[in-house]
Image (spheres, rainbow, N blue to C red):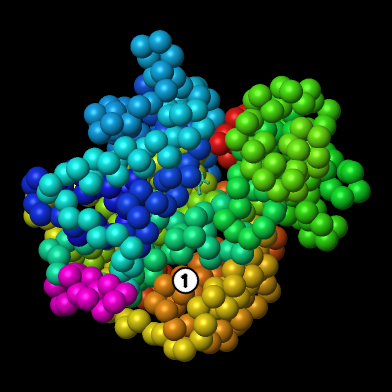
Amino acid sequence: MVIGGGLAGMTAALRIAGRVPVVIVTKAALGEGSTQWAQGGIAAAVGPGDSVEAHVRDTLDAGAGMGDAGTARAVCGDAPGLIAELERLGVRFDRAGDALALAREGAHSLPRVVHAGGDETGRHVAAALARAVHAHAGIRVVEHAAVRDLVTVDTGVDGVRLEDGKAIAARAVILATGGSGHLFARTTNPAGATADGPALARRAGAALADLEMVQFHPTALAVGPSPLALVSEAVRGAGGMLYDRAGEPVMAGVHPMGDLGPRDVVARAVFRRARETGADVVMSLAHLDPERVHARFPGVAALCAAHGIDLARDPVPVTPAAHYAMGGVLTDLDGRTTVPGLWAVGECGCTGLHGANRLASNGLLEAAALGRRAADAVAGGDRTPAPGPRADPVPLAVGDADGATVRAAVGRIMWDDCGLERDACGLESAALELEALPRPADAGTAGLREVAQLVVRAAMAREESRGAHHRSDFPDPDPAGPTRTCWAGDLPFPVPTTTPVPTARPSIDLTEVA
Ligand SMILES: Cc1cc2nc3c(=O)[nH]c(=O)nc-3n(C[C@H](O)[C@H](O)[C@H](O)COP(=O)(O)OP(=O)(O)OC[C@H]3O[C@@H](n4cnc5c(N)ncnc54)[C@H](O)[C@@H]3O)c2cc1C
């Protein structure tokens, strides 16, 4: 059984189909999820002069020393074959003549990002795979059905229970539930990104890892409620500049690369300035030729126009927003969790590929790579767990509080005290506030609250600043070097690694990122 209808889940289902019976359960329609929203593309070393080793190096550099080298070699090595497989499944990637058209994105040393429909890669990938899944006689599709809990027995996981109480038995359950952006009040993630995978896995006793590592995009459009639209880094690449309400440039003196500094540095600067001035930072392109701005960024211009903002002339209010979860359910390279019969792939899993910061366009890559790897193991009848600790299962604890009210409170607490800038005082206050929240009536919100508590605990335990995790009371990386922590129940353990963790160069050179 595959839970989730994004790239990771659909890749897994298609690869299993025909070998063993497979059912895919998803809480929205098939194809809905972050996958559909992805703009930039999929990283793969397929261009002239590129190599898997160069892709691995860029991935580990972006990960600020925490990325797992063995995982990076395997996943980056899978990438060229995956692109070919996605094409066979019906994805039409953009081409320059006979060759794949490649974009260069921030922190990639070469043009390496394969895309479709210009900046609509996710929509094209999701639609093609959804068509292939629906057309496959070997896959049973259950849409608009949320998984409420995993069914656990002594020997591991052997099925799921849906929101309506129905139980479905399965020899293997693959979690592909996507991200957890809605832990935070401001996020670019679609509504379903509510950390369901880590919540379900944890209650089944599986270990979770690197939960404190959350990537914040520096410039989401600060209009209306989440999900917030992206104002891509390419807009700053073309000359867009960030100002505060007094007209002072935000990035002056903050980083030598100014507005094109590393994603986490720009995000923190924008966050700080908004907090100091009490008003959102704005991006201005008023010094550029308006016709060229509209021609170059029709998508962003349309998003702005929907809110009465002219991208080329008006100040565009922007805010950082939670964008990607590097942490999640601890898995090995094939998506095995530490509980027999339970697998996790895509954004809900944590292979260690991204370390403390994800390299642009490695998210879709990991989703497809792990979906395929897990499928091959599952179809072979495997139920072996990954090395690492397993805790006793804990029951789902729901109450009678209104879910929407609790979700809003979780988002506010996490944004204020466990977001871009963290310290012990704020984290302690977040822990107390989360604990004091009433228990929500629905399983999804109960899980979101539980995972928020785990993120706060992990952020407290990491007394250093590294990659996306910034502690103002511990502003430097730990001189002892990077460590990774997983949690099984309430106990922390070092992440079992099979490969040495290399020293990384911390700088991230952002030029053009979706
Ligand atoms: C705006 C935006 C732009 C991005 N751009 C890029 C990019 O250019 N390149 C890149 O590599 N990455 C990008 N990313 C990240 C990337 O899109 C995601 O990491 C990736 O799509 C995750 O795929 P997934 O299959 O793991 O999850 P998703 O695609 O999010 O799918 C999760 C699925 O699980 C289902 N689900 C969740 N909980 C349950 C439950 N309890 N029961 C049943 N079903 C459930 C959901 O309905 C959904 O179908 C972007 C993300 C966003 C938000």
> Residue 314 in magenta?
no
- Give the magenta range: 152-168
Residue drawn at the location 74% of the way across and 23% of the way down:
291
Residue drawn at the location 65% of the way across and 78% of the way down:
429
Residues packed near mark 1 inside 10 Å, few (<14), some (14 to 19) or many (20 plus): many
Q: Quadrant of residue 484?
A: bottom left
Q: Quadrant of residue 289?
A: top right
**Three-letter residue code for mark 1:** Leu
Residue drawn at the location 22% of the way across and 56% of the way down:
141
Picture quarter with the N terminus: bottom left
List x then y, in percent, for residue 451.
46, 70
List x then y, in percent, for residue 418.
61, 66
In the picture as drawn, the residue positioned furthest to the right comes out as 246
List x then y, in percent, for residue 500.
37, 44
**Which is nearer the eye, 115 or 359?**
115
> Helix or strand or loop: what does disc 1 sit on?
helix
**Which is nearer the eye, 249 or 473?**
249
Residue denoted by label 1 = 448
Residue drawn at the location 37% of the way across and 21% of the way down:
46
Instruction: Please indicate, yes or no, whether residue 512 appears anywhere in the rendered image.
Output: yes
Q: Is residue 126 left or right of residue 374?
A: right
